[in-house]
Structures are given as C-alpha cells and as structure tokens.
Image (tube, helix red, strand yellow):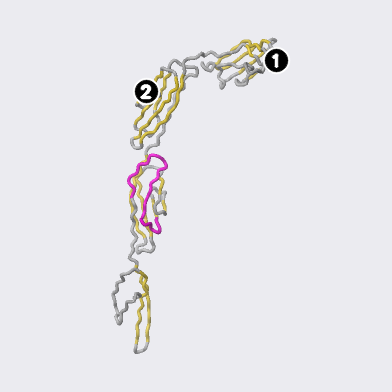
Amino acid sequence: MGNGSTFINDTSINYTYVNPGTYIVTFEAYDFVCNNNATITDTVFFNPNITNVNAVVPPNILLCDAPYVVNFTGNTPASPNNYWDFGDGVGTSTQSNPSYTYSGSGLYNVMYVAIDSSTCNIADTVNFSVQVTIAPVFSASIDFTPPPPCGVDSFIVELAFTGTGADSLLWDMGDGTQITSNVALYEYSSSGTYIITLVAYNFLCGDKSISNEVTFSDIASTESIIPNVFTPNGDGMNDKLVFIGIDETAEYSIQIFNRWGLQVYEGTDALAHWDGGGHENGTYFYILRYTDFCSNEETMSKGTITLFR
C-alpha cells in the first residue's frame, strides 16, 4: 500500500489511510504454471485539508471625510492566493487584507475567494454585503458687501447659508451675538473689526466652521484732497504732486499747463506722480479727472498748483 502494509492473495481489498501523504500502491501478479509475473503501480494522494474562508465582514460604515476607505480582512492564517471583488463593478484585489476606496454611498455585494492549490477543494468562496454611507461634503461661504471705505454710522450684514452638509447652523457675529437660522440679518452699531463665524452641524459627522472678517469705521471726510503747492527739492517731503482720496484703480487722467497755456505734462496713471522735472518755479494749471475713493463718484477738477523749490 506504499506505507509498509501488504495484502497477499487478495483479489479485492478496502484500505484506509490515516496519515496524509503520497503513496505508491504496487500490485504484483504471478502465474506459476507458465512462470509469468506482472507489476502495475498507481499513486494515491491523501490530503484531508479543505480550504475554508473566514473573511471578517465589516459593519455598516459611515464615512465623513475623503478618502472613503473600507478595510477588509481575509483568512487567518492567510491563504496562498486570494481574490476580492468589492461589488462596485470596478475594484478587485489579490491581497489577503486589502483596503478599498469607494467613490460613493451604496450597498455593495462583496465576494471573497480563498485559494489553496494544495487542498482538496482548491478554493472556497464567501459573499457578503457592506453598506457604505458617505455624509454630504460641507460646502459654504460667508460673503457680504463690504462697508464703504470711508466709514458709516452703522453697518448691516445679510448672510445666508447656501452650501451643503449641514443639519443646523449657528452664526457667531463676533460681538457676542449668536443667530440660529439659515439667514442672518444683523446690524453693527459700533465701528470695529468683527470675526463672523458660521458653525454648521451635521448629525452624522459633527460640525464644521468657517470665518470671515469685517471691519468698518466711523464716517470720515469724503472729500479728495488736491494740494495747491508742492516742493520738489529732494528733501523727501512733498516732492511730487500727490492727490489724496483718489481711487487709483479707476479711470484717471491729468493735464498740466504752464502760464502760457502750453501743456507740460499729461498722465493716465494715478500712481505716476508729477515731480515738475525740467520746469521752473511758478504757477501751473491742471485739469484732473478721477473717481473719488470715498464717494465712488467720477469727478473733474480744474485749478492751479504752485511749484516751489
């Protein structure tokens, strides 16, 4: 029987192997009349091992922040070969304990195959379902029309939540006032700098917050300042013709003429200030077109300016 056991003159036998292994069975037949004999052999592979799967099924999973990763656990000890199908029509793996990133919520039917070619049944399969719930991505902004640059008596902000991923809201206006509604309409009566914070609560994943800063000041003068004299003498003080309160980003032009009406300078860049270079002391005439920084009004001004070194 290949393990030391023999049977003589039995034309039919039943034999039970008790130890796993590979056995060479030999059968010998003799004809004493004609003095003939013959031998044939066969091999018995005895392996009682059967592949079983024991995948650990993940519980229903809530994922709040990307990436949306689910961890899977296969056989312990690991099978020589493994195959996973994650049930979304895309993902597969041959790892023993893979991690997989799902792209969205859903009920996924997962298949796990444990493969061991040394066992009798070679492979075993288990199927199970995983429910993946992905919370809405928080998306919101705090936007409002900024206060006038030169101040107001009071300032009103109107805020509304138009994002996603929130079950309830809290507006903190930065002065101790809190508002719990989708829309916040609030008036600041005192000048200052305030940090407005929106806290959005999600019942599944907790809260998120965003902030924005608003500063408004008391009313200041809204009149642009046009000097009547400048002194380009190189002392670093009043060396160029500078106009105060002009919106440097808006349309701008200036023309300067001497006392005989001859144009001596022209410019369209509010940041390029005339320094009177190459011209004598004296009175010059100007035509200035600009937008007032405070009032946002387009203005044309004419007058005289004295150059004095």
Relative depth, front residue between 28 and 278: 278
Does residue 61 belong to the magenta stretch?
A: yes
Q: Is residue 77 above or below residue 6?
A: above
At 34% from the left edge and 86% from the top edge, which residue is drawn? 31
At 53% from the left edge and 18% from the top edge, which residue is drawn? 293
Crowd band around label 1 with a 10 angstrom C-alpha radius: few (<14), some (14–19), many (20+) = few
Q: State which quarter of the image contains the N terminus.
A: bottom left
At 41% from the left edge and 26% from the top edge, which residue is drawn? 196
Q: Which residue is mark 1?
A: 279
Residue farthest front in this picture: 235
Q: Is residue 128 above or below residue 302?
A: below
Q: Which residue is mark 2?
A: 177
Bounds of the magenta span? Answer: 57-82
Describe the element under mark 2 as helix, strand or loop. Answer: loop
Rendering coords of residue 209 (x, y %): 40, 31
Amino acid tagged 1: His
Closest to the camera, between mark 1 and mark 2, is: 2
Rendering coords of residue 103 (x, y %): 41, 43
Q: Main secondary structure of the magenta part?
A: loop
Rendering coords of residue 80 (x, y %): 40, 59
Q: CA distance from mark 1 to mark 2?
A: 60 Å
Task: Assess whether mark 2 and mark 1 are in contact (beta carbons under 8 angstroms).
Answer: no
At 37% from the left edge and 82% from the top edge, which residue is drawn? 38
Rendering coords of residue 26 (x, y %): 36, 77
Crowd band around label 2 with a 10 angstrom C-alpha radius: few (<14), some (14–19), many (20+) = few
Relative depth, front residue between 258 and 261: 258
Q: Is residue 159 left or right of residue 297?
A: left
Amino acid tagged 2: Thr
Relative depth, front residue between 154 and 124: 154
Residue farthest bottom in this picture: 33
